[in-house]
């Protein structure tokens, strides 16, 4: 009995049988087979019976499958053959569709690659999902907060000690703390700016690939350095770098190369040329021991490694109690600690200061790009839909015949979809070729390394297939839907009055296309205007013809007076000044805590601070509002400051000249007398409003001089630079002569904006192109439809211009509707974009009129070819055949 | 009307002979008994299906029986058209053999 139960037909074969012969859910055939199966079991045994069963199933199912495939394939290959023939027959239509789709898809492929690359930032770290970065929030007196990715060096190690889920930590110094220094190997001198000072745990937390060196042993000793390949090549060429000694001009002395590391990948937020061992800073000066162990000195970037992702996510809330436990006068009082997961570093660091975060970007950029890409492709799909509806009306007889012969709705649907799929496959292939050609220049421009690699190829191919199918479906479904609805008899008689719905849908699609294009034109104009506004805005100081020479050594700093005088000896140098920072500085301007005299500690505010000599105002042509600038007399100047208007407003000082403010430096309060007020000048980029600024003299304790700024004449620039170099080298033998043109440096603030602008321009160009192609195709179709009407009108005496007008009117109406919809949309979006600038243009009627006019002009130009062509045909040719 | 094929004829006759037991398994066995050849189920299913489609056969379901995995039997029956078709083919056959005593091999 038990044995009886165990014997049953092979499960899988039964399943196949059930699938192919359901018999309305009753499975009678399966039942027959099973009954005979038991007979077989009795006659020939289980094994043979099972074999027999499988064989029977195979024999039953085989013809069905064969038939489906054979006819299916021959059907579909017929569809594709037809698609190809029609592609060749209607060349204008096909090429318009193909070009539109190709450009649209190419744009979206590039956007796709860009997005994949962006979303993979930092993902090469195997512990990516459980690394977090400490962020310090500093509370401001006015209720705002400022954020830094910096914290005290002691916090990381203490967290590891106190919390079991914090497995490890690694803290870094970057150039913000130690500044640049000169490195020398034999005769080769190099000015280093991209180093990181790292602890041995760097290799335990991150996964940068070491080429030579044991990660367990590296970076433990003082004065060790691990070079990247590029840096090693720069110093030593092809020699083995290990064991070589590089001299520096700093107190920490020489570095010994102990390891070699691959260049950090392009999608790493940490970019560095070398790793210097953390212990080296104690040879630089013993005070660093106090600094890194001081709870209030937020100087290090700290990364924490957690046991798992959920403990990291839960950890943020524990930092408050941690701060309460270790509270100092500042730590836990005027600042709060936060944890930023590694996955947020690339997109979530917009408002962090002092963050050397390579390639950091707002996630909005990705969204905007995605939306632009989607709309461009959509626009191309609309072209296809509209034109195939038009085209199929010419092929009505074909569809009618198919119906008469017995094609079902479903089959017609599939046929029309397979044609659009065919087109989309062609377009994707062409787009891939186009991207292949364009990608190198894109990479160059975006400073990216976009490519299909083994890591992302699977994702990329999946997405590409999705695009292909989606584009095919979107563009084909509308014609398929309308055409299959038509009656056979009207198809055969060619009596096709495009129904009301069809023409409304077609018209709204054209309007949608033009809305997209007009918004893009609008954006292009606004971006252009904003960028030229920035370029030409009066910054409040003179940035032209200004050469900035860096001070990189004590020699250069101490001899500034002599160097200044020597510089001035050149006939092409008209004015020179020294200062700690220059307006529009690119290295970050220092800050000091400022207070009113006798104010509470918690009223203190951090304000930007520079020092400058008495010529600063004159050289930069900054306007003095009240009082005087520095005298040049060291004794008089050292206890005075000059401030800007923003500071007066911020601290609410009335009648400021002669008043005192209190500036804290290394826990000493200095009382400084305000001797002058300067008009606000934009010492930061125009993304930011002018902040309060304290200018102190060069002998003040707060800042030291770092730059010579020389106003030069534009003639003989090369000779002037060479002259400055000789002078500098006479006094400073140790370091490299380093100079910049101020206006070029200031333009770099807007590099990102200009790039975004170019992307928008390109996208709008493509979308206009696609919309115009669509309009052209529709116009040629209309011309064909109205050929008799135009002929009769001409016979009755209409002039060419009248006909052109009648012809264009229909399209112009659509474009004007599009303008009405697009203008408010564009206005809204561009206002959002302009929000990121503190100094911005207002969108006026000019931009609106210009984009509306551009749209109308472009569409008229597109239609007029067809309009004039059909208006000029001889009426005899069009009306003689009926 | 199109003439029945030989296989169809055999199938219809098998169904007639079996009367109320004319379902897949027994039809197959009957055919085997008469022709002495193994018939694949697949061949029988498709042919039965075609005959139902041509309205020469109808079918009804019995109550489920346990020895078939709890499934019903589909019992087939001749329709009037089916019977007519059989009569027709029989007459034609008869007409074809009319007057022929033998073709010389019958006794071998």
Image (cartoon, grey):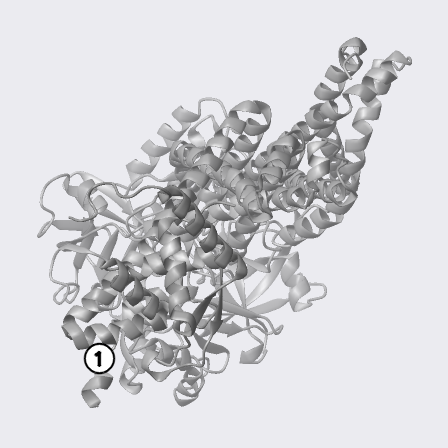
Q: Is residue A383 above or below residue A89?
A: below
**Left-right relation of A312 to A230:** right
| Image location (x, y in percent) of residue A287 | 28, 71
Looking at the rendering, which quadrant does residue A32 occupy?
Answer: bottom left
Nearest the eye: B1 or A624: B1
* Residue at disc 1, secondary structure: loop
| Image location (x, y in percent) of residue A650 | 65, 65
Q: Is residue A849 visible?
A: no
Q: Is residue A582 above or below residue A77?
A: below
Looking at the rendering, which quadrant does residue A607 occupy?
Answer: bottom right
Q: Is residue A110 above or below residue A866?
A: below
Residue at the spot 19% in from the left edge and 70% down from the top edge: A49
Residue at the spot 39% in from the left edge and 77% down from the top edge: B71
Nearest the eye: A776 or A8: A8
Residue at the spot 50% in from the left edge and 73% down from the top edge: A138
Q: Which residue is mark 1?
A: A7
In the rendered structure, the residue with mark 1 lies on which chain? A
| Image location (x, y in percent) of residue A727 | 34, 34
Nearest the eye: A287 or A186: A186
Indicate the quadrant containing the C terminus of chain A: top left, top right, bottom left or bottom right.
top right
Nearest the eye: A150 or A473: A473
**Left-right relation of A537 to A428:** right
| Image location (x, y in percent) of residue A408 | 58, 46
Indicate the quadrant containing the N terminus of chain A: top left, top right, bottom left or bottom right.
bottom left
Q: Is residue A799 above or below residue A41?
A: above
């Amino acid at each position: 009995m038990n044995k009886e139960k165990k014997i049953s037909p092979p499960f899988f074969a039964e399943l196949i049988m059930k699938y192919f012969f359901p018999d309305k859910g009753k499975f009678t055939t399966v039942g027959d087979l099973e009954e005979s199966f038991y007979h077989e079991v009795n006659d020939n045994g289980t094994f043979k019976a099972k074999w027999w069963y499988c064989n029977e199933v195979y024999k039953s199912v085989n013809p069905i499958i064969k038939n489906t495939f054979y006819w299916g394939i021959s059907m579909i290959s017929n569809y594709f053959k037809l698609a190809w023939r029609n592609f060749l027959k209607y060349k204008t239509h096909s090429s318009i569709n193909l070009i539109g789709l190709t450009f649209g898809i190419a744009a979206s492929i590039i956007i796709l690659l860009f997005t994949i690359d962006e979303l993979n930032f930092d993902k090469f770290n195997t512990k990516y999902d459980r690394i977090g970065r400490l962020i310090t929030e500093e509370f401001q007196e006015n209720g705002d907060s400022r954020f830094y990715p910096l914290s005290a060096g002691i916090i990381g190690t203490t967290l590891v000690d106190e919390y079991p889920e914090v497995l490890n930590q690694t803290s870094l110094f970057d150039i913000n703390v130690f500044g640049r220094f000169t490195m020398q190997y034999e005769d080769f001198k190099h000015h280093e700016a991209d180093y990181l000072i790292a602890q041995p745990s760097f290799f335990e937390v991150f996964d940068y690939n070491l080429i030579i060196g044991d990660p367990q042993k590296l970076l433990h000793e003082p004065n060790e350095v691990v070079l990247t390949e590029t840096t090693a090549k720069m110093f030593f060429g092809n020699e083995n770098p290990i064991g070589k000694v590089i001299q520096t001009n700093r107190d920490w002395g020489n570095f010994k190369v102990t390891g070699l590391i691959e260049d950090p990948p392009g999608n790493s937020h940490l970019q560095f040329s070398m790793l210097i061992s953390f212990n080296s800073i104690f040879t630089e000066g013993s005070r660093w021991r106090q600094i890194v162990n001081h709870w209030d000195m937020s100087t290090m970037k700290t990364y924490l490694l957690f046991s798992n992702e959920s403990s990291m996510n839960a950890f943020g809330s524990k930092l408050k109690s941690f701060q309460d436990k270790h509270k100092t006068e500042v730590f836990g009082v005027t600042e709060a600690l936060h944890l930023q997961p590694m996955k947020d570093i690339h997109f979530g660091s917009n408002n962090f200061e002092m963050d050397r975060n390579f390639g950091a970007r707002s996630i909005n950029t990705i969204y905007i790009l995605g939306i632009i890409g989607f709309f461009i492709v959509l626009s191309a799909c609309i072209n296809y839909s509209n034109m195939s509806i038009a085209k199929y009306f010419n092929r009505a007889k074909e569809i009618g015949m198919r119906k008469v012969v017995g094609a079902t709705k479903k089959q017609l649907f599939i046929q029309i979809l397979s044609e659009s799929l065919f087109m989309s496959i062609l377009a994707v292939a062409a787009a891939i070729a186009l991207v292949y050609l364009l990608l190198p220049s894109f990479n160059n421009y975006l400073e990216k390394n976009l490519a299909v690699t083994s890591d992302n190829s699977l994702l990329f191919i999946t997405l590409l297939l999705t695009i292909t199918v989606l584009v095919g479906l979107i563009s084909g479904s509308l014609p398929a839907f309308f055409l299959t609805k038509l009656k056979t008899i009207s198809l055969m008689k060619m009596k096709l009055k495009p129904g009301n719905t069809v023409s409304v849908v077609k018209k709204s699609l054209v309007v949608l296309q033009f809305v997209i294009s007009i918004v893009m034109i609008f954006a292009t104009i606004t971006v252009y205007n904003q960028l030229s506004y920035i370029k030409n805005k009066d910054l409040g100081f003179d940035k032209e013809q200004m050469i900035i020479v860096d001070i990189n050594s004590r020699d250069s700093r101490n001899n500034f007076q002599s160097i200044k005088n020597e510089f001035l000896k050149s006939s092409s140098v008209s004015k020179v000044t020294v200062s700690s920072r220059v307006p529009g500085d690119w290295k970050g301007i220092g800050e000091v805590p400022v207070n009113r005299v006798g104010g509470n500690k918690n009223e203190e505010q951090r304000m930007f601070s520079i020092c400058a000599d008495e010529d600063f105002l004159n050289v930069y042509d900054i306007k003095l509002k009240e009082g005087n600038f520095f005298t040049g007399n060291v004794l008089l100047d050292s206890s005075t400051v000059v401030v800007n208007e923003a500071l007066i407003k911020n601290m609410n000082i009335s009648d400021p000249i002669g008043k005192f403010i209190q500036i804290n430096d290394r826990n000493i309060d200095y009382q400084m007398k305000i001797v002058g007020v300067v008009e606000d000048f934009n010492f930061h980029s125009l993304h930011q409003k002018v902040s309060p600024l304290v200018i102190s003299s060069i002998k003040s304790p707060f800042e030291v001089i770092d730059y010579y700024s020389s106003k030069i004449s534009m003639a003989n620039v090369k000779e002037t630079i060479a002259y400055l170099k000789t002078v500098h080298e006479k006094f400073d033998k140790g370091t490299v002569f380093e100079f910049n043109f101020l206006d070029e440096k200031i333009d770099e603030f807007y590099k990102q904006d200009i790039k975004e602008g170019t992307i928008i321009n390109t996208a709008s160009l493509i979308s206009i192109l696609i919309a115009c192609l669509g309009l052209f195709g529709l116009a040629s179709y209309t011309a064909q439809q109205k050929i008799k009407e135009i002929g009769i009108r001409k016979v009755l005496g209409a002039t060419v211009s009248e006909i052109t007008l009648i012809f264009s009117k229909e399209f112009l109406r659509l474009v004007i509707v599009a303008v009405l919809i697009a203008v408010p949309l564009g206005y809204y979006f561009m206002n959002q974009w302009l929000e990121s600038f503190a100094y911005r243009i207002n969108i006026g009627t000019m931009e609106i009129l210009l984009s509306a006019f551009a749209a109308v002009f472009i569409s008229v130009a597109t239609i007029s070819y067809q309009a004039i062509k059909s208006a000029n045909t001889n009426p005899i040719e069009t009306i003689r055949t009926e | 009307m199109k003439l029945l094929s030989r296989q169809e004829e055999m199938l219809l006759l098998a169904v007639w002979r079996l009367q109320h037991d004319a379902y897949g398994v027994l039809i197959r066995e009957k055919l085997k008994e008469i022709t002495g050849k193994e018939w694949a189920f697949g061949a029988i299913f498709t042919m039965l299906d075609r005959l139902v489609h041509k309205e020469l056969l109808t079918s009804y379901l019995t109550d489920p029986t346990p020895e078939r995995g709890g499934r019903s039997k589909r019992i087939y029956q001749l329709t009037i058209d089916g019977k007519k078709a059989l009569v027709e083919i029989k007459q034609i056959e008869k007409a074809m053999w009319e007057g022929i005593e033998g073709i010389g091999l019958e006794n071998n």
